[in-house]
Image (tube, coloured by chain):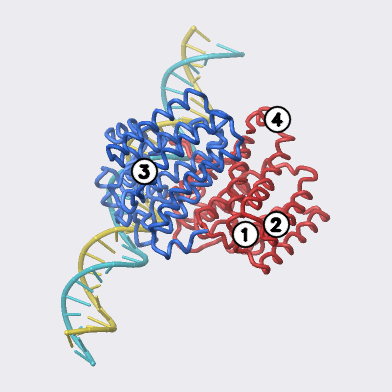
Chain colours: A blue, B red, C yellow, D cyan
Amino acid sequence: MTETAVGISAVERSAADAAGTKTGSKSEQAYAAVKARIVEGTYTPGYRLVLAKIAEDLGVSVVPVREAIRRLEAEGLVKFERNIGATVSGIDPTEYLYTMQTLSIIEGAATALSAPLIDSVAIARARAVNAEMRDCLEHFDPVRFTALNQDFHSVLFEHCPNPHILDLVHRGWNRLASIRASTFRFVPGRAHESVDEHEALLQLIESNADADTIEQAARRHRAATLDAYLSLAPAAVQAKTI
Amino acid sequence: MTETAVGISAVERSAADAAGTKTGSKSEQAYAAVKARIVEGTYTPGYRLVLAKIAEDLGVSVVPVREAIRRLEAEGLVKFERNIGATVSGIDPTEYLYTMQTLSIIEGAATALSAPLIDSVAIARARAVNAEMRDCLEHFDPVRFTALNQDFHSVLFEHCPNPHILDLVHRGWNRLASIRASTFRFVPGRAHESVDEHEALLQLIESNADADTIEQAARRHRAATLDAYLSLAPAAVQAKTI
DNA sequence: GCCATAGTTATCGTATACGATTTCGTACTC
DNA sequence: GAGTACGAAATCGTATACGATAACTATGGC
């Protein structure tokens, strides 16, 4: 759990990618490799994960691959049916709704818990990342925008006092990455709003706003993206909205 | 994930226990068996899970057992170190704090999301369970009290519209069960408060209080138990409190 | 021409086997 | 007597092998 695909900055991310993450056991290798392929979108949702084939690709036997798949299943990235096989999960718009809603709650709490521990240096870093995000909007670079978005929140969360909550945040992000790679639609205007909300959030933290206020703002930040998505989504999904 | 040890009522729980849960694959069997032993306290925290031994006990080979252990690791019930082995995790008071805090947030959200969907029948059932809990206090039956406590909240959550959140609740409960089996200390008076808070919660739901109010009340309900624990805990843990 | 059924193939699930690593005990040295 | 080094036992990690299950295909009957 120490080496989630998203718990690192954008630069490190690509570096680790190139290296192939060949640390530790073969099981670990397989886990990292398959996870990376899912998160980066090489294996898109619905993709059939044939154990023997993956094993051959990675130059290991099927046993460690099975183990890796099972771990990914526990994280929700993979669906594993008995005697049928494993497929990359995550296409379902309903799943997107569930994940975003959960993330909204978790991120809200994570931000509120972290806020008192964020110093001016971290604030400055976050602001710099946010400025870069604005640039991405002008040059239309949604991929980098997404990566920076994670970096922004990583800065906020890096001192989160509760590792369980941080872990849940990372799991949610991985989940979204897998979905985004195929089905995510860029909602017009939402990205600009998002950047503005980041700045507002930073100001709340700087001014030592009370925990509830920060929590609500952070929660709302994620929920707004969900709302924007829902405004475009089919009615069947909208009906599920709470 | 459909058959968590806690997602069922107290009676069913013991029944499934006796039956040995011999559904499906051997891997599934091993998973259910080991999980049950951890949750019920047969395997206490720190217990060394030797793969070969478990395999022999269950009459299967080590491969499915490994898989099961890995899944339990992903759920936080087991710690698995390379070339060392697996041990039941959960003794650390700090872990207790993290888990309770996370659960406080998750249960708060789960209650708020479920509230509009809870009908009068469910309310009545919950009230009946709560009455039984009062009985347990008079006859001092902490084990049954704990089981009923889960039943109470299960009734509230059974129609929770977001399965991800429900899953997180169950994981937290399992985690607590494993901890409770060894280190949990009954805090004097807290149980009585808890029962009163249940009733207050039901009244909020009946009166269609707004989501925020319900969420805060539910969150506070869990947090109060944590506070009671912390009042008895060593200073080192208290320092970690947020 | 279409449906049902039998055979084939692909893939999964698990057992067994063996090499790798760690731990523990013992003997040897200082 | 204490510490270190060596060796044996226990346990883990992974490869290979084979039986079991499900998907696919082809053949025959209607």
- Asked if the residues shown at circle 1 and circle 2 are in contact, with their CB atoms under 8 angstroms apart, the answer is yes
Instruction: Give the alpha-carbon distance from disc 3 to disc 4, as whole Å.
Output: 39 Å
Dot 3: what SS?
Answer: helix
- Disc assigned to residue B234: 4
Q: Report crowding for label 2: few under 14, some 14 to 19, many 20 or more residues within 10 A (C-alpha).
A: some
Q: Nearer the viewer, mark 3 or mark 1?
A: 1
Eye-nearest disc, 4 or 1: 1
Q: Are the two marked residues, 2 and 4, in contact with CB atoms closer than 8 angstroms? A: no
| Same chain check for tags 2 and 4 | yes
Q: Residues within 10 Å of mark 3 (few under 14, many from 20)?
A: many
| Element assignment for label 2 | helix
Label 4 is placed on what type of residue?
Answer: Pro
Can you identify the residue that label 3 sits on?
Answer: A31
- Label 2 sits on residue: B204
Q: Is residue B83 visible?
A: no
Task: Please state which amino acid type lies under the numbered disc 1.
Answer: Ala
Residue pointed to by mark 1: B115
Where's residue B216, x and y in %? 65, 48
Separation (CA) of disc 2 from disc 4:
35 Å
Q: Is residue A97 above or below residue A17?
A: below
Q: What chain letter is assigned to the residue under label 2?
A: B
**Total count of labels:** 4
Amino acid type, mark 3 = Tyr
Chain ID, mark 1: B
Question: Are the residues flagged by discs 3 and 1 from a single subunit?
Answer: no
Q: Are marks 4 and 1 on the same chain?
A: yes
Examine the rendered structure and indicate whether residue A11 appears above or below residue D16. above
Q: Position of residue A215 (x, y in %)?
A: 56, 41
Tell me the crowding category of disc 4: few under 14, some 14 to 19, or many 20 or more residues within 10 angstroms, Cα based: few
